[in-house]
Image (cartoon, coloured by chain):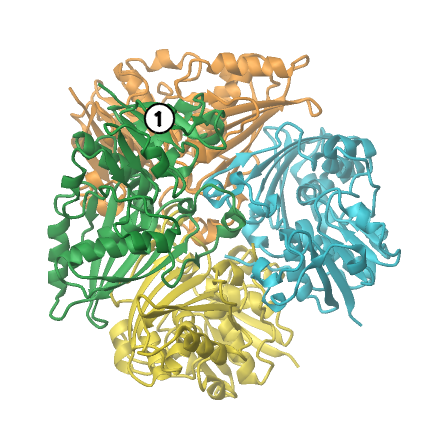
Chain colours: A green, B orange, C cyan, D yellow
Amino acid sequence: MAVRAAVAGASGYAGGELLRLLLGHPDVEIGALTGHSNAGQKLGGLQPHLLPLAGRVLEPTTADVLDGHDVVFLALPHGQSAEVAEQLGDDVLVIDMGADFRLEDAADWEKFYGSPHAGTWPYGLPELPGARTALAGARRIAVPGCYPTAVSLALFPAYAAGLAEPEAVITAASGTSGAGKSPKAHLLGSEVMGSMSPYGVGGGHRHTPEMIQNLSAAAGEPVTVSFTPTLAPMPRGILATCSAKAKPGTTAHDVRTAYEKALADEPFVHLLPEGQWPATASVYGSNAVQIQVAYDEAAGRLIAISAIDNLTKGTAGGAVQSMNIALGLPEDTGLSLTGVAP
Amino acid sequence: MAVRAAVAGASGYAGGELLRLLLGHPDVEIGALTGHSNAGQKLGGLQPHLLPLAGRVLEPTTADVLDGHDVVFLALPHGQSAEVAEQLGDDVLVIDMGADFRLEDAADWEKFYGSPHAGTWPYGLPELPGARTALAGARRIAVPGCYPTAVSLALFPAYAAGLAEPEAVITAASGTSGAGKSPKAHLLGSEVMGSMSPYGVGGGHRHTPEMIQNLSAAAGEPVTVSFTPTLAPMPRGILATCSAKAKPGTTAHDVRTAYEKALADEPFVHLLPEGQWPATASVYGSNAVQIQVAYDEAAGRLIAISAIDNLTKGTAGGAVQSMNIALGLPEDTGLSLTGVAP
Amino acid sequence: MAVRAAVAGASGYAGGELLRLLLGHPDVEIGALTGHSNAGQKLGGLQPHLLPLAGRVLEPTTADVLDGHDVVFLALPHGQSAEVAEQLGDDVLVIDMGADFRLEDAADWEKFYGSPHAGTWPYGLPELPGARTALAGARRIAVPGCYPTAVSLALFPAYAAGLAEPEAVITAASGTSGAGKSPKAHLLGSEVMGSMSPYGVGGGHRHTPEMIQNLSAAAGEPVTVSFTPTLAPMPRGILATCSAKAKPGTTAHDVRTAYEKALADEPFVHLLPEGQWPATASVYGSNAVQIQVAYDEAAGRLIAISAIDNLTKGTAGGAVQSMNIALGLPEDTGLSLTGVAP
Amino acid sequence: MAVRAAVAGASGYAGGELLRLLLGHPDVEIGALTGHSNAGQKLGGLQPHLLPLAGRVLEPTTADVLDGHDVVFLALPHGQSAEVAEQLGDDVLVIDMGADFRLEDAADWEKFYGSPHAGTWPYGLPELPGARTALAGARRIAVPGCYPTAVSLALFPAYAAGLAEPEAVITAASGTSGAGKSPKAHLLGSEVMGSMSPYGVGGGHRHTPEMIQNLSAAAGEPVTVSFTPTLAPMPRGILATCSAKAKPGTTAHDVRTAYEKALADEPFVHLLPEGQWPATASVYGSNAVQIQVAYDEAAGRLIAISAIDNLTKGTAGGAVQSMNIALGLPEDTGLSLTGVAP
């Protein structure tokens, strides 16, 4: 019997990617689609790549429209999920693709988002220690941010194995879809093609506390994070270059072994063979994560690099993966390991 | 019971896209994979996006390796398919993704390819009049060229309805994967990013006789084709802008009606609503074709524009669609209508 | 003694490119810079590539601010130039980079722009027959549209030599800067990277009457134009593929000879050697035009292809070239023939 | 009286960019152009953007051809400069754009390049302390690598002011032209568009010892460098994200002040106003360097980010700037501060 899923925020990039995945999910039937300023419009003009849904009309985002589905995905601007969620039945699986329920620390939330903290839900990054247990049977799930997904998967094996000092330095390059579909001058094609540029430098990016939360949990001690995001001239993908000083006595062999062990049974996270490096193109449109790790003896640092598709594993694919776990479906149902390349 | 499929030429772009599709095809089991200079290598280093096949080793392209499969896909350089094909059993479904068996006219073949004509196989563009009948049960199929796919689907409704004069003028923009994976200086990223350039201008492109063949068959009279291909700064996709003078007395309503009628029941070819135009991004990685048509009264011309993914509908998707028909499977098995966008 | 130049509309793409060129012009001193919504802001935040002008503050676009300069460039939205221009002294050289004064036919203007016709100024495409004479000493100049520049230069030699039938078919690919700097969803980097798409199909593009005007003048008879613009995934550049049936008796030699003769003495328009084709990357940031021409005997058509930088030769470079002529400076002062490639 | 300049290696990207700059240099006359496998060919087919030199024919790279010029630029593969240079007169200004004479430590050279060390020449990064003195009147100059240029300019102010701990962590994104014009499969447009990927991770990149050399000299103590280069989907540009722990007691004000002081009089290196970040598009085709710096108090790190054009300031522009100093010309002759954007 099909799972009926509603999507709030169906006209944006996260909502569109989610619908692309749900269209290929054998156990899901797509129910209500809602929008805000686009309510009343056909999806065909808003998401022209979703041909099978071209005739569907967006409804307004209200609890009335969304309730009664088995699963409700919220792809709403930050700060809008709580109000909708509390009106939905406790038996409805609510999956928030926004930030509202990701952070455990209310002070962090208020500092970075400037509004009262709504709470903390089970965290939809199944690969982290203990996460699958928390997700099984859950009826509320907070999908991680795209950068924290890429960074946490790259570094948690090192921290969990006690190989890295608790000061992580991260530079990540993201495709422009991470910045959303609202038209802004600096996101015009004319501006971004041929250009790399940083933003949110110096600790200001909102995904920083989420990384600190994940890495500190893995390390069992507080980890600081110096995070620099950059905008890359591509529509999708995150390449996260993460490093930390190695703890004294660490060898290259220790590092390799820790990653092999931590990732051995993961269906979506692939530690590449030595000598091969991740590329965002290789995971384009897929839920796969490519990881590689190196130990730079001269600098005394461990470098872990991950590539994900920010819209798939980084958002909508992570959401579907978490839904599968919550509902007791095989974790990889409807999710692809194969990138669309070249 | 699964169909066992072998792929000759698994390390190139056409072969890689085919494997991506076959990995998602519920009725296919992937058998032997062969290469030429890459025989003996693991696929993981050659096609890093095909993670589920990363450990598979390429075998040499010989009849011994390929025979015994239910289906053999040939993704070989032009001129090499005939020799392999004739060594394979008559009951094997051989699907040639090269040009060798596309043209009916031996003189055309010799003029454009400079070698003796190998023959003509059923033509794998199911949307053309009569094509599905020829493909059903076939054991030899010639997959069309990517440009002829885009152009023929854009213009056959006009010619079949007798609305267009037999002189077609076509400009098409193709992504760089159409030029293959052999390293050449003019195909370097440094050269193609930020640049549009034509090639094969003035009637010299090898796909021209194939377009003439298809359009003349639809029109029931000889059609001339002025075809200008251009290389666009994107990895995939073809946008074909096709036009012809309208026959006297044609109205905009006649044109719209002819296209609606011709394409009404096609699973993959979508005539867009009036006012919406095709975009290659919307069909990225999918087997869908977006079509729109206009009548320019001042110039007296009918303009039909199509967007396809050159590697999917233009090559590997067309091959799988034809395989499905030949084997009696539902035509859309394993094929997506949904583009990977943005 | 330096020519003092003011730029109205300094925060847009056309204004920015003009300032880039004026910064390198040995005879020009940059005077007032004006903006509309950006008045009061520093240029450094709006045009970060114009480092030498980073500290300049935009003034409001008023006749008071602009008058008193030797040259005033108007890079304003269509329909706003006339009001400013009529308040400027007759001795001021006013160069309009908008459309307002390009068309000779008031009915065409009203049909395509929907407002009363403001008049016709000498046309700033010096390469057209008679244009340099009209520009010498002029105090009002209308800079051509970017598409008409590319198309007229590609086809006027054929029409002037009587080699082409008066029905031109044109497909042109433009970089996204041609659509301006106003943020719109379909121009986001996420949307345009990896995508080709048409717009204004079927005779609706506003540059069509301007092409008809130029080609008809060259041919000495009315020429119809079927024009399809497409948006290409690159920031700059236009590649125009133009064709027409050859007049009976035309030979490939006639065509080549006509182009060699027409373009022999042009400083910026280069007919490439046979076998080499234009590429937009080769003229990136330069005022050069690359042209190549072919005769397709089988289709009976002449194909002329041009590549320009839409912001340089297509807008700001054409404006400076015309200014040089009007002021009696060497025509190529401050203008480069060298593209920024790769 | 014009300086006569020869260019060895005129068909590659570095040679092409150098010629673009020399064409605009008022004091230079372009003499012999040489190539290796391309000797005998016209430049027009190899560098189609250099229209004014289209008819020039490449000569073989021999001392006979090169000697007798005032300046000889060597844009040759690593390891080939020494043999040519020693055959040229002592009065000839020889500017090596390769790596051969950059490193002071012979052991570093041998470790990273695998051949005997050829020597050390004055280092063509005029902004480093003491560099201009060494370059004035020099007749042998080693142009820095593109990455070391971006990184050294970003970090030397911090090290010279004693604000940073001697462990630098650097991630840099480079356009594909940095990898040269030799056709390789992983550099095809199909592979690089839409993809970010790292290479030379873990201390293996040949530019690492050059960075260590520069930063250690600025710091007055040995600095370790953890350097991760990444390939970005753009033809040109380097964005270098550089960080180090701040020395105890450092404040944000100290950092800003140190950078303002160090860069105040530099003609090409611009410290951006607070709140504005570098972008590679802003320095496209120019010799300008954009720098911004931040202090992340929570992580205790100083982050300095620079953007350069790898072919201009990173190679050919740096070479011309150094030539100007060596010859006693104004340092900015023939060099632009204005990027080609958008």
Residue A190 drawn above or below residue A2: below
Q: Position of residue C275 (x, y in %)?
A: 56, 46
Q: Residues within 10 Å of mark 1 (few under 14, many from 20)?
A: many
Q: Position of residue D257 (x, y in %)?
A: 46, 78
Residue topped by disc 1? A66
Q: Position of residue C279 (x, y in %)?
A: 55, 48
Residue B163 drawn above or below residue B143: above
Residue A55 in view in this figure: yes
Question: Mark 1 — on which chain does it sit?
Answer: A
Instruction: Give the quarter of the image for residue B15.
Output: top left
How many numbered marks are there? Answer: 1
**Residue visible at 65% across and 38% down in the picture:** C252
**Residue visible at 68% across and 12% down in the picture:** B249
- Between C326 and C190, which is closer to the camera in this rendering? C190
- Between A2 and C322, which is closer to the camera in this rendering? A2
Instruction: Give the quarter of the image for residue A51.
Output: top left
- Between A26 and A126, which is closer to the camera in this rendering? A126
Q: Tell me which amino acid carries mark 1.
A: Leu
Asked whether, in this view, residue B96 is left or right of residue C145, the answer is left
- Which residue is most to the right? C90
**Residue visible at 22% across and 21% down in the picture:** B92
In what quadrant of the picture does the N terminus of chain D appear?
A: bottom right
